[in-house]
Image (cartoon, rainbow, N blue to C red):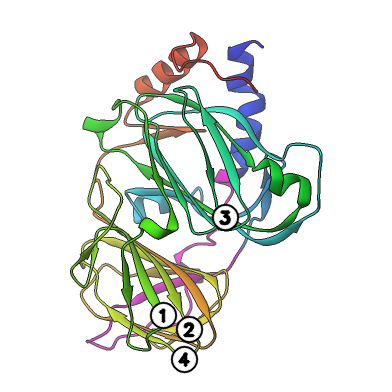
Amino acid sequence: MDRKKFITGTLFTGFAALFHKAFAGKEAAIEKISKADLRGVEGILSPTNTHMVGNGFKVMNYFPNGKGFEERMSPFFLLDFNAEVKFPPSDIAKGVGVHPHRGIETITFAYKGSVEHHDSKGNHGVINPGDIQWMTAGGGVLHKEYHEQTFNRTGGTFEMLQLWINLPAKHKMTPAKYQSIVHTQKPKVVLADGKSAVYVIAGEYNGVKGVANAFSPVIMYDVHLEENADLEFTLPQHYNSGILVIDGNITINEQKAPENHYVQLKNEAGKIKIKAHQKSLLMVLSGEPLNEPYVSYGPFVMNTEEEIKQAIEDYNKGKFGFLND
């Protein structure tokens, strides 16, 4: 296959869909609150822009959105969510074929179903429900991910989330690596009802430190709430912060946030109070903004146009390694 033709054609046809607008402007934010003790809610995004990535992931994209919203959530750059969907049994592999990454970390969370992955560094694994695949692309890697073979043949319920974290300039070219995090390894804080829990992926919650290592300060919680459960916490006021309601229905700081909606928080001090109206699953994201220039092109996120050109040139020359389709 001609690498240059691939990088400028087929690959970016698929990735272009990731950059469609998912946020109709900050004016779309619903009610704002002003209570001094609560952190303000900037807006609540409804699920939009549902599209296929490859033939195995039916995702809704919350950011980036073509309006600079990725700056609002720096260092997080992309949030794609494959809401619960039923895939029928298939003998045809479903997923995303071989593609490159540079300058970012990609984190895949499995909620229902299983995903298998390979890369050009020889890494291979399966992500089962509750597990996390944390890939540092760094200076460059080829990667493919697809429905795990047994799941693909039998079919079933599928629910996944993928997050991209932009690497700081000084770490853009760090060697590629993986962190494979199984559900049982995630540090857990049980809440007052004795059933609900906060799993600490990165950062810290109530003195419990997360299991993942990141290249810039980030906080990530996998929150499981039973019906009528209450949760209260704070996040650093200068961190960009948001919450995705994966399943269920909550009230956050007196605003309703139903299933598959994303809550953008203001950068200000204040408590975050959540009430679950039914069994709910949330992803909490918070990170210190990088405050660095960036340039993105498909699966590459760098700091300058020259670095993007170099990434494409390196890919075309085979410097990202080799991986069979």
Give whichever of 187, 317 is nearer the camera. 187
Mark 2: which secondary structure? Answer: loop
| Contact between labelled residues 3 and 4, with CB atoms less than 8 Å apart | no
Residue, disc 3? 160
What residue does disc 2 label? Answer: 226
> What residue sits right under mark 4 in the picture?
228
Nearer the observer, 215 or 34: 215
- Image location (x, y in percent) of residue 145: 59, 37
Q: Amino acid at mark 4?
A: Asn
Looking at the rendered structure, the kind of residue marked 1 is Ser
Tag 2: residue type? Glu
Front-most of 302 and 226? Answer: 226
Residue bearing mark 1? 196
Q: Is residue 217 visible?
A: yes
Q: CA distance from mark 4 to mark 3?
A: 25 Å
> At 71% from the left edge and 40% from the top edge, which residue is drawn?
94
What is the distance, in whole Å, between disc 3 and disc 1 at their CAs?
21 Å
Q: Verify CB contact (< 8 Å) between mark 4 and mark 2.
A: yes
Residue 150 among those drawn in magenta: no
Of the residues under marks 2 and 3, which one precedes in the sequence?
3
* Secondary structure character of the magenta stretch overall: loop
CA distance for labels 1 and 2:
6 Å
Q: Give the mark, 3 or 1, whose residue is nearer the N terminus.
A: 3
Q: Position of residue 42 (x, y in %)?
A: 38, 72
- Report whether 202 appears left or right of 84: left
